[in-house]
Image (spheres, helix red, strand yellow):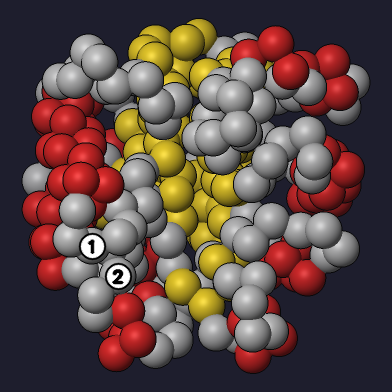
Amino acid sequence: MKIATYNINGINGRLHNLLRWLAEEKPDIVCLQELKAPDNLFPEQALLGIGYNAIWLGQKSWNGVAILSKYEIKETRRGLDGEPEDTHSRYIEAFINGVVIGCLYLPNGNPWPGPKFEYKLRWIARLQAHANKLLSFDLPVALIGDYNVMPTELDTYKPEKYLSNALFRPESREAFKILVDSGWTDAIRKLYPEEPIYTFWDYLRNAYGRNAGLRLDHFLLNDKLNSRLLSAGVDKQVRGWVHSSDHAPVWITIE
């Protein structure tokens, strides 16, 4: 089973690219982030037309997450506990083909320091609390999406450039490490422990052409799913398509 994540950066504006990638690579399950569309403008029929069921949590102009699947989708959660006043659409979860899939779009947090960075750290704490609950279930679980965190220096082309960036701040990296160490495996790093791998290239300064990238999109697997991990990769070529997202799709395969 092939599971992918893709920060689409505007689903309706890049629907052609999304449909092309789905047709070419044929993932079984896909987590999408940054839909940037309200619920009523999600392109459900276009996705059904090529064989994908979907659930989504939209938001006008910002955020938004969705799960696509060739299998039946049983939605299990929308949003995270802890801040009832939080209106950001950043988490959706489902049970699909025997696996719990949590699709997330973690806050960017810039500028640091400031309220956006504090929100980012609170959101990670809320994710940690929910992740602990998921670990108590006797089920394979994956927490998938754009974490907006570069865990180590290996995950950025120029670490010194990002010392004051919320994506690379010690507080963000430590929170991510605590999450992983609580019972999860970073699938990409398990299979490629020493290799620079990027999933995002800025639109500015020919970042994609220079391969000046960042690794922001991650798969965290619990032990029941980690034992079934077979392979992983980045569809980097998609970032080079016309009118592409600044992220590329990332995927794993499991038994």
Residue drawn at x 52%, y 19% as measured from the top left: 57
Q: In screen coordinates, is 24 left or right of 5?
A: right
Residue at numbered disc 2: 165
Give the answer, above or below, for where 18 lies relative to 41. Answer: below
In this view of the protein, which residue sits in the foreground, 64 or 153? 64
Residue drawn at x 68%, y 84% as measured from the top left: 206
Residue at numbered disc 1: 112
x and y percentages locating residue 66 in the rendered image: 57, 27
Circle 1/circle 2 CB separation < 8 Å: yes
Graded by Cα atoms within 10 Å as few (under 14), some (14 to 19) or many (20 or more), the crowding at tag 1 reads some
Q: Amino acid at mark 1?
A: Trp
Q: Alpha carbon of mark 1 to alpha carbon of mark 2: how far?
A: 6 Å
Earlier sequence position, callout 1 versus callout 2: 1
Q: Secondary structure at mark 1?
A: loop
Give the answer, above or below, for where 31 lies relative to 162. Answer: above
> Is label 1 or label 2 in front?
1
Q: Amino acid at mark 2?
A: Asn
